[in-house]
């Protein structure tokens, strides 16, 4: 369910919840406002306990930085989705040890494998309101780049003070379009190891064909373990490290004493990424009228090129596997959103709602004086931003991976020449481990033939645009020219790559410690390109900061108007998702009719795996269940995991939970806060809920923990993990 935003401004928006009972991604501090709804829904736990991040069960829920996970044992065992651990499975795979295909199980602690470079387990320990610090009187009066820089400077001060407590990662997050800010403190566990992942035929059964679809039969689970130093504090990987002991962990629900049924209360805690439910009509129109179709086109072409370039080369397929998964997931998501958008009345409703807001503002002189200028300014500033996005969309696709690496290395050299407090966010001492990990990961994520093919393809598209719209710096860096064809571009890229040694990991890593003078003196072609682009990169960065500062100030005013407007109607509000801890609640429920016109029952079973199985040579191998699993299903070897009403083992279930990308891996809890599943997907016709929530359509797809336990006990024989989780 991974999704990402290309917006220059990470503006949160407002959503009102009076219309739909199960809509809402609630901040922990807001839970007292919905305590009655939680209790009425069936929660047995005191809702007030959910407001305490260090208490059970919230203290067991962690972030992986893009996905969610949870502790499920006192020894730091963490469960998440297979697709969330996919990068680590891929990183540890080679043609002669293909863990993607076979799966992985560490029979002992010593057998557990280091996760991909940069992997982190983040345990939220505190959230602090810092709006008054960020928007002090001086900053509130600023606009443009000056405002952006002032906000960033204060954020860095707050973060530095917070991270004086060693072993923690702190970040400031904006809420409600920058009206509110919170400082979030997280224990940062740096030694993360892969413990168990099922074979692709389980964890990714159905592949891209079944992605975002129902009925579903995917065993989307994997296990990590968190390790700390001998002193119990976060540390880098070492054989002397020991498993982390969390303050709290979740108990997997017993299939005997706590079976999950249709209609049962469920709750999910996680770190949802981005939603856009109250973007302004002009933003919505731009997104679906141009931006997302253009993105989908580029993504589709990228997928085809990666497949063509890696065909018959298993090493290439493995290296590109993680990137390919992301491309396919995002492409299908955008296609689903567009299908729901086309022919709908979404824009008309957004425009009508915005007209009501404007009428409310203009209906009172004080409101008009307070909000009117921001409403007008926001519209024009959005138009300016959209023009930039049109001109530069292809830059996200046409830049060679090694050039991106070289630019990061040179920018690091430039920033390291400054005092740490004055460096760009992302290039301070606190960020060096992440930069090192990103450079290291290219070792198993870079495939040169594919990289060249993608760059040449999209550079040709860029150069086919009117010459007066092209950025001269981007054209000149590879000695290209407007209108140049793909073949000649590829020839030029070949020359550049041949004159660079950055594809060698040791060489690339050595540049992490070199100064600006060394970069300027280098004759490495890609280092020279990074140096040549530096001034233009900073020009574009300053341009974007100027626009972002203006837009943030105006957009925040619009968000305040929205907040006050909804408050005047007696509506409770939650901020749009922004990668911070949230809670959603709902129930197990199917859908009638489903997107295909059939009756979507709430559970699928292992019998559907047998029905879908096609073997390794059909349908791209996406429906290729392991032979051992098929044999166990056909033998009806179900034990305590058989559900009488289904006469089988449930695999996945539907719920009314309000979720989005970033919620992947989130623990799904029953009324007693026991783990009954893992959130991993939504349905294709409802992915537009990021923009427009429709309770009749929205369903989240969850892994049923009974299937996970059955597969682990009956097929994969992961005895050690099951005993550790105290499975009953």
Image (spheres, grey):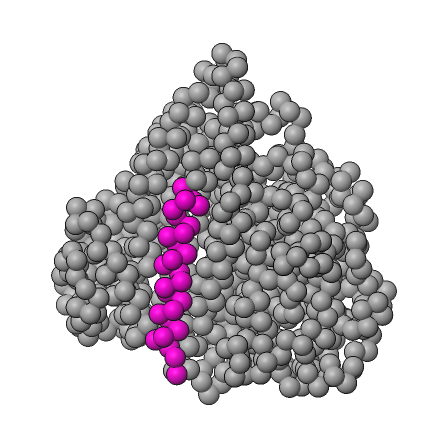
Q: Which residues are the magenta region? A: 286-312
Q: Position of residue 719 (x, y in %)?
A: 71, 80
Q: Does residue 632 lie above or below 137 as drawn?
A: below
Residue nearer the viewer, 201 or 692: 692
Location of residue 241 (image quadrant): bottom right
Outermost top residue: 365
Q: Quadrant of residue 24?
A: top right
Q: Residue 413 or 442: which is nearer the viewer?
A: 442
Q: Is residue 557 above or below residue 432?
A: above
Residue at image point 46% right, 35% down: 281
Kindly tell me whether residue 47 is visible in this rendering.
yes
The residue positioned 59% from the left and 51% from the top of the image is: 686
- State the image coordinates of residue 726 (x, y, percent, origin top left): 76, 71
Residue 610 in picture, x, y percent from top left? 68, 78
Above or below, 64 against 292 in this view is below
Left/right of residue 115 with respect to residue 701 in the rendered view: left
519 in the magenta segment: no
In the image, residue 301 lies in the stretch drawn in magenta:
yes
How many numbered discs? 0
């Amino acid at each position: 369910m991974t999704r990402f935003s290309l917006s220059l401004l990470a503006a949160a928006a407002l959503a009102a919840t009076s219309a739909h009972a199960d809509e809402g991604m609630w901040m922990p501090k807001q839970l007292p406002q919905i305590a009655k709804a939680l209790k009425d829904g069936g929660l047995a736990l005191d809702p007030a306990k959910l407001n305490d991040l260090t208490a059970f069960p919230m203290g067991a829920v962690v972030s992986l930085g893009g996905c969610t996970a949870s502790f499920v044992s006192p020894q730091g065992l963490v469960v998440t989705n297979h697709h969330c651990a996919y990068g680590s499975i891929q990183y540890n795979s080679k043609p002669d040890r293909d863990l993607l295909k076979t799966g992985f199980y560490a029979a002992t602690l010593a057998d557990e494998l280091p996760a991909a470079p940069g992997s982190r387990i983040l345990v939220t320990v505190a959230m602090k309101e810092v709006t008054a610090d960020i928007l002090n009187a001086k900053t509130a009066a600023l606009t443009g780049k000056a405002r952006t820089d002032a906000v960033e400077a204060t954020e860095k001060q707050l973060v530095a003070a917070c991270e004086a407590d060693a072993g923690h990662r702190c970040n400031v997050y904006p809420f409600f379009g920058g009206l509110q800010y919170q400082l979030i403190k997280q224990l940062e566990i740096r030694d993360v190891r892969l413990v168990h992942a099922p074979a692709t035929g389980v964890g990714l059964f159905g592949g891209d064909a079944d992605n975002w679809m129902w009925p579903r039969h995917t065993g989307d689970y994997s296990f990590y373990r968190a390790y700390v130093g001998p002193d119990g504090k976060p540390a880098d990987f070492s054989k002397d490290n020991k498993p982390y002991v969390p303050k709290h962990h979740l108990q997997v629900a017993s299939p005997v004493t706590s079976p999950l049924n249709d209609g049962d209360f469920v709750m999910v805690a996680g770190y949802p990424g981005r939603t856009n439910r109250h973007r302004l009509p002009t933003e919505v129109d731009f997104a679906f009228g141009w931006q997302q179709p253009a993105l989908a086109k580029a993504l589709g072409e990228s997928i085809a090129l990666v497949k063509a370039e890696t065909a018959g080369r298993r090493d290439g397929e493995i290296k590109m596997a993680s990137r390919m998964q992301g491309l396919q997931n995002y492409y299908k998501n955008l296609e689903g959103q567009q299908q729901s958008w086309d022919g709908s009345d979404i824009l008309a409703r957004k425009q009508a709602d915005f007209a009501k807001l404007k009428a409310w503002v203009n209906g009172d002189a004080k409101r008009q004086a307070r909000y009117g200028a921001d409403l007008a300014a926001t519209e024009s500033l959005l138009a300016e931003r959209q023009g930039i996005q049109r001109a530069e969309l292809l830059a996200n696709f046409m830049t060679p991976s090694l050039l991106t690496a070289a630019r990061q290395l040179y920018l690091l050299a430039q920033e390291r020449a400054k005092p740490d407090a004055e460096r760009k966010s992302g290039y301070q001492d606190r960020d060096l481990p992440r930069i090192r990990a990103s450079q290291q990961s290219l070792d198993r994520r870079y495939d040169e033939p594919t990289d060249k093919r993608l760059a040449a393809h999209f550079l040709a598209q860029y150069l086919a645009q009117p010459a007066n719209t092209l950025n001269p710096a981007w054209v000149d860096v590879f000695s290209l020219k407007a209108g140049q064809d793909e073949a000649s571009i590829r020839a030029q890229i070949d020359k550049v790559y041949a004159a660079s040694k950055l594809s060698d990991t040791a060489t690339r890593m050595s540049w992490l410690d070199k100064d600006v003078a060394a970069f300027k003196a280098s004759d490495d072609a890609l280092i020279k390109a990074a140096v040549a682009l530096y001034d233009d990169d900073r020009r574009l960065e300053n341009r974007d900061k100027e626009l972002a500062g203006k837009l943030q100030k105006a957009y925040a005013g619009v968000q305040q108007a929205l907040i006050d407007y909804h408050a005047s109607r007696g509506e409770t509000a939650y901020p749009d998702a922004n990668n911070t801890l949230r809670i959603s609640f709902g129930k197990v429920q199917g859908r009638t009719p489903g997107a295909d016109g059939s009756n979507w029952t709430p559970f699928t079973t292992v019998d559907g795996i047998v029905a879908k199985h096609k073997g390794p040579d059909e349908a791209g191998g996406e429906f290729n269940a392991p032979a051992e699993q098929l044999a166990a299903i056909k033998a009806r070897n179900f034990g305590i995991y058989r559900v009488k009403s289904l006469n089988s083992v449930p695999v996945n279930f539907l719920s009314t939970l309000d979720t989005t990308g970033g919620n992947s891996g989130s623990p799904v809890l029953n009324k007693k806060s026991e783990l009954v599943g893992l959130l991993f997907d939504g349905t294709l016709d409802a992915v537009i809920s990021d923009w427009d929530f429709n309770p009749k359509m929205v369903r989240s797809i969850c892994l049923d923990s009974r299937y996970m336990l059955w597969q682990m006990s009956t097929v994969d024989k992961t005895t050690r993990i099951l005993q550790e989780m105290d499975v009953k």
